Image (cartoon, grey):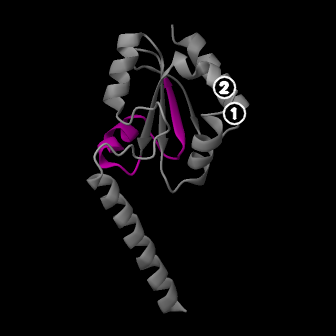
Amino acid sequence: MKNLITLLIIGAVIMKLLGSLDQSLTPGADKGAPVGFQTRYETALSLAKSSSKPLVVVFSASWCPPCQQMKNEVYPSPEVAPYKSQFVWAYLDVDDPANQATAQKFGVRGIPHIAFLNPQGTEIDTTTGGIPPSTFASKLQSALASSH
């Protein structure tokens, strides 16, 4: 039984490594980001500044069930849809080494960690963990009101 558990753990590690290798070899891989989300913080912040739109920064991971629930059910929901064009959106994979400094800057301790920023990059609000579409929409409405 102990050998089986060891083999399962080794297999899981190999699968994760192969998945990472596959993404790194794929030009333009989106790292699992929803459509319309930036995958680099610096790019998203630049867009927010130039468009004078507030920024939503989502710290997430492919292995995180609440993150995937938010990605598949909350961000594309009818409650959130009216806010899509009013923000610049960033989806940062915490397992990507390029995002680790940004995650540290925002004090990410759990995911999904969502930071709401004004167009200059100052944090307005934050939330951690999965939340329903209506609650997320309320957070967006509040962030929008506080961002100007």
Q: Is residue 19 magenta?
A: no
Q: Which residues are magenta?
A: 94-116
Calculate the distance from the C-alpha at mark 1 to the C-alpha at mark 2: 6 Å
Amino acid type assigned to the residue bearing label 1 in the image = Pro
- The disc at residue 119 is none
| Residue 38, above or below 7 | above
What percent of the width, then of the height, locates residue 31? 40, 46
- Provide the secondary structure element on which disc 2 rests: helix
Q: Residue at image x 57%, y 18%?
A: 143
Q: Is residue 104 magenta?
A: yes
Q: Residue at image x 38%, y 26%?
A: 44
What percent of the width, then of the height, locates residue 100? 34, 44
- Provide the secondary structure element on which disc 1 rests: helix
What percent of the width, then of the height, locates residue 8? 48, 80
Residue 77 or residue 49, whichever sits in front: 77
Residue assigned mark 1? 133
Q: Quadrant of residue 70?
A: top right
> Residue 129, can we see it?
no
Neighbours of disc 1 within 10 Å: few (<14), some (14-19), many (20+): some
Q: Looking at this rendering, what residue extends furthest in the top direction? A: 148
Contact check, label 1 and label 2, Cβ < 8 Å:
yes
Q: Residue at image x 39%, y 43%?
A: 30
Residue assigned mark 2? 137
Residue 17 or residue 103, whichever sits in front: 17
